Amino acid sequence: MIFNSVSFSIFFIVFFLLYWFVLNKNLKLQNGFILAASYVFYARADWHFLFLLAGSSAVSYFLGIYIGKVTNDRQKRLLLYLGLLQGLGTLVYFKYFNFFITSFANAFSIFHINLNIHTFQILLPLGISFYTFRTLSYIIDIYNDKTKPTRDWVVFFCYIAFFPCLISGPIDRPNLLIPQLEKKRNFTYEHGTDAMRQILWGFFKKMVIADNCAAVTNQIFDKYLVLPGSTLLLGAFFFTIEIYSDFSGYSDLAIGFARLLGFNVTQNFNYPFFAQNIADYWRRWHISLTSWVTDYVFTPIAIAFRDYGKLGLLLAIILNMLIVGIWHGANWTFVLYGFVNGLYFIPLIWLGKLGGKKKSEHSKLMPSLAVLKNILGTFTLVMLTNIIFRAESISKAFGYYRRLFSLSLFKTPVFQGKLDAAVTLFLIGLMFTIEWLHREKQHGLQIDYIKSRFLRLGIYFSLMFIIFIFDFTEQHQFIYFKF
Amino acid sequence: MKFFIKRVLYFILYLPIVYIIFLFVSIPILPKHLQRNIHYVRFNGDYLYTKTAEADTVKKLDILVLGASGAYRSFDPRIFKKNGMRMLTLGSSSQTPVQTQYLVNKYINKIKTKMVIYNVDYIMFGIDPLESSLDFFSNAHHFDRQLLSMAFEQKSIVGFNTFTYAWLNSLWKNDKKEPASIGLDTYISDGFVERKISKHQYSGEHLKKISVNVDPKQFQIFLDICKNISNKGIKIIIVQTPTSIDTYRSIKNKDSIQQLFSSFKSAPYLNFNDTTVFKNNLFFDKTHLNQQGVEIFDDILIKKIGNISY
C-alpha cells in the first residue's frame, strides 16, 4: 500500500473520518486506532516482519522504562548497550550480514585463501533502517536524560510505527513525536489546507518528475557501456533529480498525511539543490537522518577528537559520512559514496567555512552570479557523486566515470525518447522555479500568501492536470523503500 | 473540520469538470509529445470506426469474424460473397478477448449471424488489453456503459484520459469520414483491409525463439465468449490464421497452446500453420497474408467450413 495508490487513498479517507469524527473524544482510543492502522499498513506491505516490528518496539519500550528507573550508572550503561545491541544487531543481521560475510571472504581471497563461507537468503524487512533509528534515538535519549520514558505502551508503539513515516521516514525523534501522541490533537483549517497542498506537491514531484526521470535514468545506466559520455552526463543529471524528487516527494506526502492527523513531523528536505556548498547541502538533504547521525555519531566523535584540531574534525566528518553512506545499503558503493562526500568537506574545514552561513538571498527573485556559481558547483559535485550511489558496484561506477570523462562527452547525446526527456527537463525547470520562489517556506506549494482564491484553485487544478497528463505510468515504487 | 471537509468535497466535485475542460481545450493545441498520458488516434489503419458503423446497419449475416489484425487481413468478404456467404469482419489491431467480448455483447443479438469465426492470435492472449482499448475509445461511435467499464477495468490513466477525450470529441463533432486508403492499405466494405500482392512480399528472417504467455484471465474471457455464442445456437469456429513459417517456428510452446485452444469442445479449432501451403511469398510481413495468400487461404477455409459437422 504505497501513498500513490488507490488502496491507500481509500484507507486514508476511512481512517481520517473515523479518527476525527468517531474517536476524537478519546485520546487512548485514537492512539489505539493509529497503532492498529499502522500495523495494518505495514502488514499490507510486508506482513512477514510485523512481529519483528512489534518485538523491536516491545524490547525498546521495556528497556526505556528500566533505563529511566535505575540509578546505578553501570546498570544504566549495561541496559543502554543491551538496547544498542538489540537495535543495531537486528539491523546488522537483516541488512548487513551477507555483506560483511562476503566482504570478509573476498578480503581473504586476495591472499589466495579460500574461505568456504555460506551466505543466507535474508529478506530485508521494510522500513527497518527507519524504525530502528527511532528505537535507538529513544534509548540513547533516555540514557542521556534528554527524554523521559513513556509508560504508555500504545504511545510508544505508535511512535515507532506511525504509518505516514513508518516505511521511509522522516526519522522523528522521541522528543518531537511522543509528546504529540500524549496530548489531544487539534485540527485547524489552515493546517489542513496546507497539508493538502504539501501532499499535492509531493504527488507532483513523485509522479511527474521522479517517475519520468527514472525512465531516462534506467535506460542510460543499463546501457552505459555503449553510450557516449554526453549521454552519461545526462543520466547522472536525471538520476540526481529523480532521487531528490522521489524522496523529497515521499517526505512531502508523509509530512502532509501526518499533518492531516494533527501531527508535526520533521522537515526532511530544505531545498538541497539551492545549497551553496557541500556542508550546506548535507544540512538540507534527508535532514532527519543527517541530524540523527550528527547528534549520535558525529558530535561524540568530534568531542573525542577535539585535541587533533582540523584533522580530528575531518576524521569525525568522514566517519559520519561513512555511516550516512552505509545506512543506505549493504554495498561498497554506499561506503565509497559516504567517503567521497566526507572528502568534499576538506576545503571547507581548511578554509574554516564549515559552519559559516552563506550570503543570504532571501528576498531576491533571481540569484546573484556568485550564488548561482556556488549552487551550480555544489549541484555538479552532488550529481557526479550520485553515480556511485546509483551504480550496482564500484567497478561499474568507475566504468561509468571512464566513459563519462572520455572524448565522447562532446558528442551529441544518444538515447531513446529524447523528446520525452526534453519535456521532463521543462517540468524539472518548472519544479525548481516554484521551489526557488518558495525556498523560505516549508514546502514548495505553501502558497497561502496568494490572496486570490481563484488563483490558488487555478494552481491546484493545473498541477492535478499536469499529474494526470504526465504521470509516468510504469514507475510507482519509491526509491527509499529499499533502504 | 466540517468547513475543511466541505471545501475538499467541493474541490473533488469541481475537479472532474475543470479537468474535462482542461483536457478539451489543451489536447487539440498541445503537440503530440506533450500528450503523454493520452493516446487518441482516430483512423489508425484497422478501420474500426468504419466497421462498427457498418455493423450498426447490418441485420443478417452468414459469418461474423472476430479477432486481431489476422481477422481483418485474412478474410476477404468478396471471396465469401462469390461462394454465397455474407460476411462481416469486426477485427481490430491487437484485439484481445476483452475487446472481443465487448463486440460480442454489443452485436451478437443485433446481428443475426449463422456462424462466428473467432480468429485467435496467441500473442493477443498475453498482451496488455490497454492498447486495443485505446483504439476502441478513439474510434467509438457511441459511448455506452460497457465501454466505460472497459476504461475502468484497465486501471490506467491513459485509458481514462483517452476515453474522456474521445467521448468529448464525439459530443463536439463526429462527422469525419475515414479515408478509403491509408498508406498501402485499402478498405474493402464489410471489414476487410486489403494489401495488394505485387509490391509486398515477405522474404523471411531469423526470429528469436519466444514462449508465448497466455494470461488465464484473458483465456477465461475467451472461453466465456465461445460459450456465450454457442449457447445462442450460433456455430463457432476457432481459427488460427496462417503466419509465416519463421514466426510459427519461433514460438516454443506452440503445442501446449494449441491443446489449450482445442479444449473448447463446442467449437472446432482449425490451425492453418501446420500446413506447408503458406510459403513466405504469400505474406507481406512475418504475420500477415498478402492478397494472393488471402485468396488461397479463403478458398481452403470455405471448403473446410463446408465439411465441418456440428
Image: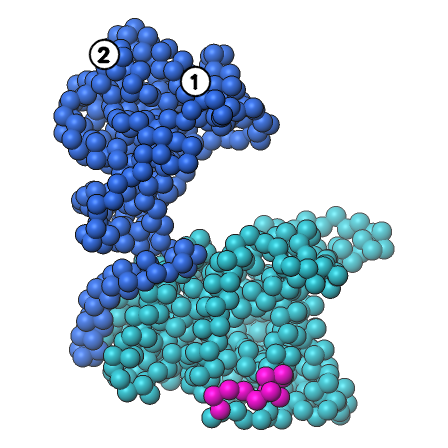
How dense is the environment of label 1, judged by Cα within 10 Å: few (below 14), some, or many (20 and up)? many
Dot 2 amino acid type: Gly
Residue at image point 80% right, 56% down: A108
Residue toward you, B39 or A384:
B39
Image position, residue B217 (x, y; %): 33, 36
How dense is the environment of label 2, judged by Cα within 10 Å: few (below 14), some, or many (20 and up)? few
Residue at image point 33% right, 70% down: A462
Image position, residue B45 (x, y; %): 36, 37
Give the vertical position of B226 relative to B42 (above or below): above
Q: Specify the segment rendered in magenta.
A: A364-374
Shown colour of chain A: cyan
Q: Quadrant of the C terminus of chain A?
A: bottom right
Residue toward you, A302 or A450:
A450
In primary-sequence order, the first of circles 1 and 2 is: 2
Residue position for label 2:
B84
Visual colour scheme: by chain
Shown colour of chain B: blue
Q: How many marks?
A: 2
Residue position for label 1:
B293
Image position, residue A48 (x, y; %): 45, 54
Q: Is residue B54 left or right of residue A82?
A: left
Residue toward you, A123 or B79:
B79
Which chain does tag 2 point to? B
Q: Which mark is residue A106?
A: none
Residue at image point 51% right, 19% down: B281
Is residue B10 in sight in this rendering? yes
Residue at image point 31% right, 73% down: A460
- Is residue A370 highlighted in magenta? yes
- Element on which disc 2 rests: loop
